[in-house]
Amino acid sequence: MSTRAQHTIARTVTIDGIGFLTGADVRLRFLPASVDTGIHFRRTDLPGSPLIPAHHSQIVPRQRRTAIQRGRAVVEMVEHVMAALSALEVDNCVVELDSTEPPGGDGSSQVFADAILHAGLVELDRPASRMAIAHPVAVGDTTQTIRGLPGTRDVLTIRYSLDYGANSPIPAQVHEVDISPATFLNEIVFARTFLLETEAAALRSQGYGRRTTAKDLLIFNGKGVIDNELRTPNECARHKLLDCIGDFALSGYSLVGRVEAHRSGHTLNAEFIQRLMSSHEAGIQRHRPKAA
């Protein structure tokens, strides 16, 4: 299995926006980090500005999103940031936040990818940590599954299939892609978060999304998308694939192989990474990040 050099960003870049969950004004900064640092989130609004490693061991249970926690410091909805960093091959970076969540942007990874591209990358003098899927690994049940399989090429291929049944306003759809910076930017980065109108109403009743409207992401009712338009017919499958990229990045390694996901969400994505890591420890090419 070939490898590439680690990267960090060339300079600090800042993103200002609104958090989807809290509705708070949020400032996020991507900062360069040294070789073998890995990805860490820093809560600058908390005493001592605590760091949280972007690692599957820090995942805490949530519905419809991925959150990481260290001590009392939590960052919600890390998946869209992690997808951009991972797919654009940023191995070492500190992500500073002055809130509990990143800016929502348009519900995709576009705002984060744009910032990373604006910052530029610097190659470091250490190989990136990689892990090839050596044997089949599967999680799930009769309704949702993820299978990891050995690949025939030196790349991570993800196939996501989405099917919520004949009565769903979201049609069945599939997307498959070999993950690279180019394919991420061309096929995945723009795909937005989606949910049903009933789900959006339930979230608002819980106090979430008070500054988010149907124009900010994809909300479906029985007639289709409300106050918005799809960017591609299978945008929902592409967004779920984007979530997979971000969640799988919490393994701490660049994966090589084939992953087939059907109706999976963040909880099953996390279970898959845990199962994969525990069954493949002996075969990992190790260049472990430094402890924070």
Image (tube, helix red, strand yellow):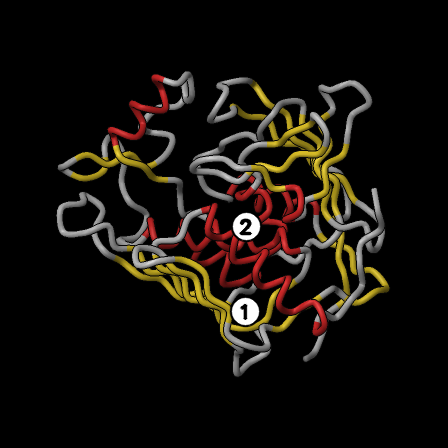
Estimate how packed mark 2 is, as few (under 14), some (14 to 19) or many (20 or more) residues with alpha carbons within 10 Å.
many
Q: Mark 2 falls on what kind of element? A: helix
Image quadrant holding the C terminus, namely top right
Distance between mark 1 and mark 2 Cα atoms: 14 Å
Q: Amino acid at mark 1?
A: Leu
* Cβ atoms under marks 1 and 2 closer than 8 Å: no
Image quadrant holding the N terminus, namely bottom right
Estimate how packed mark 1 is, as few (under 14), some (14 to 19) or many (20 or more) residues with alpha carbons within 10 Å.
many
What residue is drawn where x is 81% and y is 50%? Answer: 37
Seen from the viewer's position, the closer of residues 240 and 74 is: 74
Measuring from the top left, give residue 203's x and y in whole percent: 36, 24
Q: Mark 1 or mark 2: which comes first in sequence?
A: 1
Q: Which mark is residue 4?
A: none
Measuring from the top left, give residue 251's x and y in whole percent: 64, 56
Seen from the viewer's position, the closer of residues 107 and 250 is: 250
What residue is drawn where x is 58% and y is 63%? Answer: 276
Tell me the residue that label 2 is attached to.
247
Seen from the viewer's position, the closer of residues 149 and 111 is: 149
Q: Amino acid at mark 2?
A: Asp
Left or right relative to 60: residue 176: left
What residue is drawn where x is 67% and y is 48%? Answer: 55
Q: Mark 1 falls on what kind of element? A: strand
- 226 to 165, vertically: above or below: above
Tell me the residue that label 1 is attached to.
156
Q: Nearer the viewer, mark 1 or mark 2?
A: 2
Seen from the viewer's position, the closer of residues 62 and 38 is: 62
Count of picture labels: 2
